[in-house]
Image (spheres, rainbow, N blue to C red):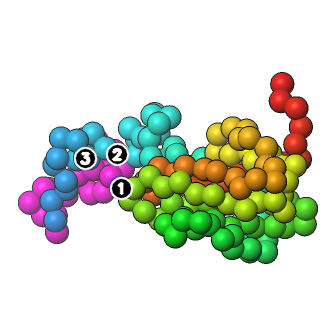
Amino acid sequence: MQWNADRNGGFSQADFAQLYLPPLMDPVYGFQACNVSAQRRNESSMLQWLRRFIAVRKRYPVFGEGSFDALDAANPSVFAFVRTLDDHDVLCVNNLSRFAQPVELDLRKYAGTTPVEMLGRVHFPAIGELPYLLTLGPHGFYWFTLDPAAPRA
């Protein structure tokens, strides 16, 4: 990652000709346009997204310490599993395909809970006795906490 828009992307003050390889000079992805300094100012940047992603991962120890239970997804392009630590369950659903994929999951074991997406805190429909239906974008994923069903305000 280029650090800033300064000379040589902030890596070196050496003359351009003395560098082992030249810095990327592309107008879109070159160091003048795409660098850490610019991404810190943009809430929609990849850097900010990754920071939010890591913060969620750190906030929930279930990812590193919890038990792992793979789910039988009806679609072979989707990998789904539940991590459990104490009484806290996290449902992870991953699309391994470059195309959008639907999936039906048997979540009857978790009936009565409400999946809450962990990055945006969006409440999804409560889990019942029927197969749970989701559609994932290309290489998309969901991380849900499975919270006891409660009326939404």
Q: What kind of residue is marked 1?
A: Met
152 or 126, which lies in front?
Answer: 126
Q: Percent x, y for residue 28?
A: 22, 41
In the displayed structure, 123 sits above or below 88; it is above
Question: Does residue 87 show up?
Answer: yes
Mark nearest the camera among 2 and 3 is 3
Q: Is residue 101 magenta?
A: no
Work out how far the residue at label 3 is from the one at label 1, CA to CA, in angstroms: 10 Å
Q: Amino acid at mark 3?
A: Tyr
Q: Which residues are magenta?
A: 2-20
Does the magenta stretch mainly form a helix, a strand or a loop?
loop
Magenta-colored stretch includes residue 9: yes
The kind of residue on which mark 2 rests is Asn
Residue 100 position, x and y percent, is: 44, 52
Instruction: Name the N-terminal-most of marks 2 and 3.
Output: 3
Q: Position of residue 55 (x, y in %)?
A: 66, 51
Identify the residue at image location x=71%, y=41%.
124
Q: Which mark is residue 29?
A: 3
Q: Please name the residue that numbered disc 2 is placed on.
A: 35
Is disc 2 in contact with disc 1, using a CB cutoff of under 8 Å?
Answer: yes
At 64% from the left edge and 45% from the top edge, which residue is drawn? 119
Q: Rounded to the nearest whole Å, what is the CA distance between mark 2 and mark 1?
A: 6 Å
Q: Is residue 134 above or below residue 96?
A: above
Q: Earlier in the sequence, mark 2 or mark 1?
A: 1
